[in-house]
Amino acid sequence: MRDSLKAILAPRVEPFELGPGVAVKVKELSLKERISWREASIEADGKLKDNWIAELLFRCVRDEDGSAVWDAPEDVDGSESVLGKLLEAAQRVNGLAADSTKEAQGN
């Protein structure tokens, strides 16, 4: 039973095609990862940091081997339209609304 429970609790990973022959995986955050994302996305005064999207993409986007695509949130950069598509996928996989600022702030 314990193995079955662990399997059910494991965050899901969905393939996401960026273009012909180029795909990544978009990972659902675990509870601990979601808490870490919130903590990394909020200033001490409760305001949302400008890099909340980079923090989310860093935690969710994986290569074909399941490794992080970027070494750190500060490294998340590229075409805004492509990153926007990845953001939409990360929000969908994680059950976040299109306006994830409230989620990042813990509301």
Image (cartoon, rainbow, N blue to C red):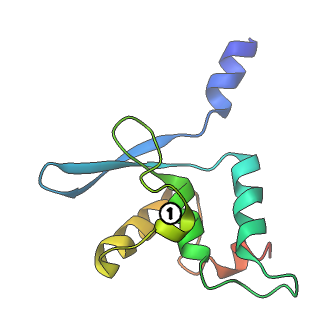
- Foreground of the two, 10 or 23: 23
Residue 22 lies left or right of residue 67; in this view the side is left
Residue name at image x 80 percent, y 72 percent: 106
The amino acid type of the residue labelled 1 equals Leu
Badge 1 density bin: few <14, some 14–19, many ≥20, Cα 10 Å = many
In the drawing, does residue 58 fall left or right of residue 31?
left
In the image, residue 32 above or below residue 44: above
Quarter in which the N terminus is drawn: top right
Q: Residue 60, how many percent across, how many down? A: 52, 54
* Res 2 quadrant in image: top right
Which residue was labeled with disc 1?
57
The x and y percentages for residue 101 are: 66, 81
Question: Is residue 94 shown above or below 47?
Answer: above
- Residue at the outermost right position: 45
Q: Secondary structure at mark 1?
A: helix
Question: Please, which residue is most extreme toward the left here?
Answer: 20
Q: Residue at x 37, y 72 (%)?
A: 83
Q: Is residue 3 above or below residue 18?
A: above
Task: Measuring from the top left, give residue 26's x and y in whole percent.
Answer: 44, 51
To which quarter of the image does residue 50 belong? bottom right
